[in-house]
Every structure is written in structure tokens, then in C-alpha cells.
Amino acid sequence: MKNFATLPITALLLTLLTACSAPEPDNGEIRIIPRPRHVERYEGRLTLTEQCPIVIDTADSDLLRIAGFLNERLRTAAGFELPVTAADDRAAVRFVPVDGMKSEAYLLQSGPRGVRIEYSDPAGAFYAVQTLLQMLPPAIYADTRQRGTEWTIPYARIEDEPRFAYRGMHLDVCSHFFGTEYLKRYLDLMAMHKINRFHWHLTEDQGWRIEIKRYPLLTEKGSVRRETVIGSCFSGFYDGKPYGGYYTQEEIREIVRYAAERYITVIPEIEMPGHALAAISCYPELSCGLEEHYEPATKWGVFRQVYCPKEETFRFLENVLDEVFELFPSPVIHIGGDECPKQSWKQCPHCQGLIRRMGLKDEFELQSYFIRRMERFVNSRGREIIGWDEILQGGLAPNAKVMSWLGEEGGIEAARQGHEAVMAPHSRYYLDYYQADPDTEAICMGHLVPLRTMYDYNPVPEVLTDDEKRFIIGVEGCVWTEYMPDAARVEYMAWPRMTAIAETAWSPAAKDWEGFTRRLEYHFGRLDALHVGYCRAFYDPLIQLHKDSAYTRIATIEVDAPDAEIRYTLDGSEPTAASTRYTQPFVVNRSQRIRAAAFRDGKPIGATTSKQMN
């Protein structure tokens, strides 16, 4: 263990009486999300006041900015900030660079002498500040002065480093558009949870959202759809209202800069060869020319109108990407590659002639040809591609990374071929899927993927050898916004489930559901202070009916909240603390209506839920 340098006793006593005095010992758990690699908790607490300086290399612009994040929170919520200085003998928040630590790692020690943060790179110092903020009362995240709060942190030693280098969160801005102010809030929430990749889904069938100066029609026309489907893609009802929006190049530079200041790399996605209808509606010559009219899609789904692999298409995409490279310094560019129907290519004389001339087996190999050609161009500009796992079809491009969404198989196959993979299986990490009882939730995509399903997922498949496992470089939570028309719905769907993904991305592989739920319940106070409208199904029993006979079902009930007991009734009455306690699955018939609620100390903690056999 590394120790603070010893001060003369008089200086130590002065410290304890002024800047960093400790109230009564508190041996409670340090409740941080994502969980640090190693935590030692000591008796005592440290009180921060304006007499406790931040000691850094004041010539280091990164550290000045990082200190500014801490002071911004203190200034807003506590009403004071810590003086920033290059040297000070008082108890302080002291940043000390150390050689040999892993990238993004840090060591945080708090005691009567203040806080000492050792770090290897600025990202490590930044993440140490995120941990330090979570060690303070949740009110530190409030947007107004919180009078009467004592700004203390527990004495502790925290050694920390990330499990994965790639810790991603995705946002689809094509189904629904979100302005730059909300994107900044989104990035702030990512940074708070040590997420370091923002996958920005910018082009789709339903709208083109990035300004490309060489092709102005992409935003003049391609960014606006005529109307939007109401309900699912099969409903046949539409709202009759034009919908659109796009980001100017200046706005994109602003978001990229804002993210970089929080050690987040922005990875743009420019879809190809499928999901191209918005672009084709502006420049029909990019298609196989099989239809007389093209327009941005007005409903969700997969469409047969895809890029035709001809020279003018490749010139178009190369010109687009050249402007993308100017805007995004990310070494990796996402090129989509998913859900590319082959009907148009099968009917297209050019595509069939190309298959014959290139000696390709079929349209799947034609897609591989398309991706490989674009990869060569991207590589020639010093970048690499990542794509959804369909880019494996017909043969994987030589240097491509794979984002595995269909399941684990794509990531497994990529790793076995020696390619890096990011795990984002839809059955585990798609945040547009239901998180609570689908019978009671507003419309979502997919099936039920509750918090625990996301938490329990292990993204490193055991079928891989140890050598192959190193190619699994991270995870990503995906927010597709077909049924998320506004920021409030995004936050409801993404949180708190994104905390589970963040913990898997950062924390050691061993899972601790009980510990996680205890920390998460405390963490809700932070999200409340930030006005995050997260889903509160954490406190509500989930009732599920499983097939049994033609006349019966087996009922199971569970709740995420720790230390809660479930009480239920079968006659439709409101459960009370005296109702039957759920201990194991039971049989119900058509006449019985289950109503359940979670209780602590005899008091309900969430909503009553109900279910009846159809």
C-alpha cells in the first residue's frame, strides 16, 4: 500500500480542524457504479471545504479541465469551489502522475490528509474524479445550491482500471432526431459511468442526419420524411406530418469536442450498402434503378432499395467519407453492413454482370466485395472500419472489426478469425426492448429484456480459447429510437439498464447482483438529482405466466429491489403486508387475478402489478 507523506503533528491537527475534518466514523459500503476493481474502506470521513485546494500541474491543460469538472459540481451544488494551485502543504485533492499504470487506470486514496489521485494518463485522472464525485452525497449532482448538506467522502483506498478498452453507448438519431443540447447531456451521463465510445447512428432509410457539403440534397431532402408511422411498422396508420432534422458540420465539431473533453471517442455510422433509402431518394443514380420514385422511409423496417455497387456509388461514398474524416478524428468508422436485402441486386443487370466478371459466388460475396472495397479506401485514409456482424457474410474484410448484434455468433467467428469484436447482442444489450411487463408498457421493440438480464450477461463467450478471448475488446448498449420520440423516452428506456452494461464494461468479470442492486438503489439518488427520468420498474414485481395445461399457468414473481419481500393476492384485491408472501412458483387458473407488491418493513416500496391468464 502506498501512504501519504507524513506531516508534522501540528500541521496535521490544523488540517483536521479546518479543511478536511472527519465526523463520526461511517463503516457503510462505498456505493459506486460501475464497481471499482478494488476498494478498501476505513473508518472516518473527509469533509471538503473551500480551504481544501486542488494541487495539480497548472501547466497541464487536461488537468485544469479535469479539476474544472470537480469545481463545477461543487460550485453549483455546494456553493463553493476548491482553489487550484501548483503547490500547497495543506490537506488537498492532489493529482500525482505515475508511470507504469495501465491506460485509464487510477489509484484514489482519501484520508485526513485529503485525497491523493495517482494516474497514468489524463483519462485515468478524469475517471478518478467521477469516482470522487460518487463518493460525495448524491446531492452533488443537483443543479441548484443544496444548503445544509455536509460534503463528505469516506476514507478509502480505491484501485481501479477498466475491464474493456471499448465501453460503448449508441444512439439512433435517424428514427427520431435529438438536438445538440440533449446529446451533451447524453455524453455527460456516459462519462459519469465511465463509458468512452459514443456510436452515433447518423444515416438510415428514415433520414440522413449529417451535413455533407458536396451533396447538399442529403440534408435538404434526405433529412425529412413525409410522415411517420403510428404504432408498429405494420399498423398502416400515419401522422401526416413531415419530420426531419440534421446536424451541421459545425454542430458535429462541437459534439466531437465536447465528447473528447470527457474522454469519449465519437464513432460515426454511415450505413452501407443497405439502409440507404434516404440517400437514394436524393440521388437515385446510386440505386439499381428498379423503381421510378424514391423517398425517405415513413415506417420502420428493412427495405430492398440499397446502394448499387457501381463506380459512381463508390465515388459518392468515398466523397462522403472524406468529409466525415474531417469531422471525426476517431480511428474507427462504422459502416453499418447490416440488413442488406439482395432482391435488387438479383434483379440488377449491372450487379449480375459484376458477379460474373469478379468470379463471385453469389450476392453475399458481392456484399463482401462492396465492404472490402470500402475498407481499402478507409484504410488508405489511415482509418479502420467496424460493422454489424452481417459483414461476415461472404467473407470478412481483412482489417475489419465486428459489432455482434444478431447474437454472440458474429463476435465468436470474428475472434476465431483474429478480428476484434464488440459484443452488442440484441437479446441482451438492445435498450429499445421492453424492460418491464410488455402488457403494461408503452410500445417498444422486441421482447422483454429486464435489468437483470443485462447485468448477468457475460460478453466473453466460454467457447473461445484464452487467445481468442482477447479479441473481444468491449461491449455496447444500443438505443434504437423507433419508439422513442423524445429525450424523456430515451432516458426512460436507457436508464437504469445502461448502468448494468457500464458495470460489465468497466468492472471485473465476477458478478454480484445483490451488491449491484444495493449500489443502484443508492445511485438512483444521483440520477434523481440529475433529473433523469429512468424506469422505476426496479421496485415493481414482475409477474410472468408460464405454459402448463390448457386450463392452468405457472406464475413466477420477482423484483429487482434488494431486501424486499413480495406479497400477492389472487382475488384481485390490493396486496398488503399481511397478504401471502411469494416464496416459490404457484399454479393459477383463468378465474384468478394476481396482484403483487414489494414491501420493506411492512411498507410498499413500488407500484402494484397484476396479471391474469388470458
Image (spheres, rainbow, N blue to C red):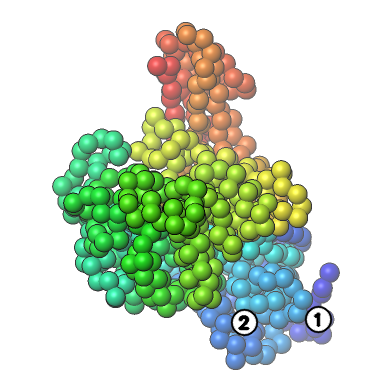
Q: Please give the name of the residue rendered at 58% of the width and 51% of the height, measured from the top-left corner.
A: 423
Q: Please tell me in which quadrant of the rendered image residue 574 appears.
A: top left
Q: Which residue is mark 2?
A: 54
**Residue 465 located left or right of residue 219:** right
Q: Amino acid at mark 2?
A: Ile
Q: Is residue 333 above or below residue 554?
A: below
Q: Is residue 57 above or below residue 471?
A: below
Q: Which residue is mark 1?
A: 5
**Which structural element holds mark 1?**
loop
Residue closest to the far top: 551
Q: Residues within 10 Å of mark 1 (few under 14, many from 20)?
A: few
Question: Is residue 329 visible in this depiction of the protein?
Answer: yes
Q: In this orientation, which residue lies closer to the viewer: 202 or 342?
A: 342
Q: Please give the name of the residue rendered at 74% of the width and 65% of the height, measured from the top-left corner.
A: 159
Residue 482 percent location from the top left of the image = 34, 47
Q: Amino acid at mark 1?
A: Ala
Q: Please give the name of the residue rendered at 24% of the width and 71% of the height, measured from the top-left corner.
A: 216
Q: Please give the name of the residue rendered at 47% of the width and 8% of the height, measured from the top-left corner.
A: 551
